[in-house]
Image (cartoon, rainbow, N blue to C red):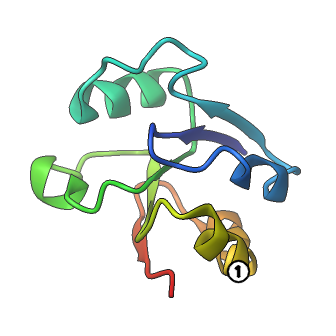
Amino acid sequence: MRILFDQGTPAPLRQALSGHQVITAFELGWSTLKNGELLAAAEQERFELFVTTDRNLRYQQNLATRRIAILVLSTTSWPRIRAAVDQVIAVANSCKPGAFIELPIP
């Protein structure tokens, strides 16, 4: 699966998703793109999952027509995400096109 990490997504999470192709928005030079532009570019480049920590994304964008699955992590804290990494992996592996999942991280 091709996965795009948004700006706030901790880069070490990439190792936990080792069976997937993970690329960051920064690596693609997409750091200045706004959410709608970023999602459109990701879909155009055939990313299947967008991982973000932007909890307002649902309210800022019309997600009804999106083909890319979106996973919103409730924190940017790597130690907290690392403790819940099995949940993140399970959700990432089960995402369907167009899905929107908010994953609360304790």
Question: What residue is at 81 percent from the left and 59 percent from the top?
Answer: 16
| Quadrant holding the N terminus | top right
Residue receiving disc 1? 83
Q: Residues within 10 Å of mark 1 (few under 14, many from 20)?
A: few
- Residue 75 picture location, percent across and down: 44, 67
Q: In the rendered structure, which amino acid carries the disc numbered 1?
A: Ala
Q: Find residue 58 and report its image quarter.
A: bottom left
Observer able to see residue 64: no
Residue at 83%, 50% in the rendered image? 15
Provide residue 51's location: percent of width, then percent of height: 51, 51
2 horizontally vs 102: left or right: right
Q: Is residue 48 above or below residue 39?
A: below
Compared to 94, does 2 lie above or below? above
On the image, which quarter does residue 95 sit in? bottom right
As rendered, which of 62 and 27 lies closer to the eye?
27
In this rendering, the answer to whether 93 lies above or below 26 is below
Q: Describe residue 19's horizontal placement relative to residue 1 as left or right.
A: right
* Secondary structure at numbered mark 1: helix
Asked if residue 49 can be seen in this view, the reply is: yes
Q: Is residue 56 left or right of residue 76?
A: left
